[in-house]
Amino acid sequence: METQLTRDILKKVRQIEVRTNRLVNDSLAGSYNSVFKGRGMNFDEVREYVPGDDVRAIDWNVTARTGIPHIKKFTEERELTIMLMIDISGSGEFGSSDSSKREIMAEIGSVLAFSAVRNNDKVGLILYTDFVELYIPPKKGRSHILRVIREILFFTPRGTLTDIKVPLDFVNRVAKRKCVAFLISDFCLPGSFNDSLQEVLPALRVTNRRHDLISLIISDPRESELPDVGWITLEDAESGQQVDLNTSDAQVRNEYAQLAQERKDLTNRAIRSCGVDLLELSTDSPYMPPLLGFFQTRMRRAVR
């Protein structure tokens, strides 16, 4: 018997499907196809040489056997595998506007997944905290994509911490061929932030060499600025550590904002130093314009 919880889940998944499908139809389909077009060539057939053909494509074995020049014909390998690596640690539940960071991650994952399906590509999912919580192998089709969306939205993690190395090492083990790997996280790292970030860099470099790695960082404005509301208690959603701050003190607010900006700048420089493409998104702003702009930038870079 269908429970109210099941109905609520199905309703939310359907809302995500309708919204993201419309966005894909209206905006993203062409950009996705242009940016992530086939990454290789497959042998198709051998045919007789005609003037103007590239002589480098001549099949000398067939030519010698038949006495007539033949060339090899290739077709573009169109099918791709998209791997979504989504952070579901405790910090993702935070959101000071209408949507939490995890909900934004789910919508972005849905947009990418529906774009992939429209282009007959496979989509796989890795949900992680400080270990791989769930792995769904790449497949095609609407029912598969709806399952992916459902898991992103409603999967209950056992862990609360974040370890970015975990999904990177995992995708390198399970993806035998080159794929397009989206690393979606808020990059709220445990312990000493600088030390934790440095530990991630080797895995970023290795994964970027093996695959087309793209990093999407989701943030919330309240993570970079404090409101002037007097004394508040801040709690780290992953470690549980608490700290009391007097937000009426302008110096406290300024130091908080400065520390947040320093971490942001450090993260961006570190990721880009590994050759990884980076897109920053916020819970309080529409994600489609920057996502489209990001794809268009990659498109222009690809044709140069």
Image (cartoon, rainbow, N blue to C red):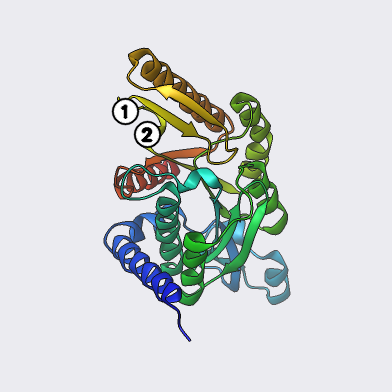
Whether residue 280 is visible: yes
In the foreground, 60 or 30: 30
Residue furthest toward the top?
251
Q: Name the residue rendered at 50%, 60% in the picture.
A: 152
Q: List x then y, in percent, for residue 139.
A: 57, 70
**SS for callout 1:** loop
Q: List x then y, in percent, for residue 265.
A: 47, 24
Q: Which residue does the numbered mark 1 point to in the structure image?
A: 227
Q: Name the residue rendered at 39%, 38% in the picture.
A: 220
Q: List x then y, in percent, for residue 3.
A: 45, 79
Quick check: 189 left or right of 199?
left
Quadrant position of the C terminus in the picture: top left
Which label is found at residue 222? 2
In front of the other: label 1 or label 2? Answer: 1
Q: How many marks?
A: 2
Callout 1 touching callout 2 (CB < 8 Å) = yes
Packing grade of label 2 (10 A; few <14, some 14-19, many >=20) is some
Q: Earlier in the sequence, mark 1 or mark 2?
A: 2
Packing grade of label 1 (10 A; few <14, some 14-19, many >=20) is few
Q: Name the residue rendered at 69%, 52% in the picture.
A: 170
**Residue type pointed to by label 2:** Arg
Residue 244, placed above or below residue 48: above
Quick check: 212 left or right of 130?
left
Image quadrant in which you'd find residue 44:
bottom right
In the foreground, 239 or 164: 239
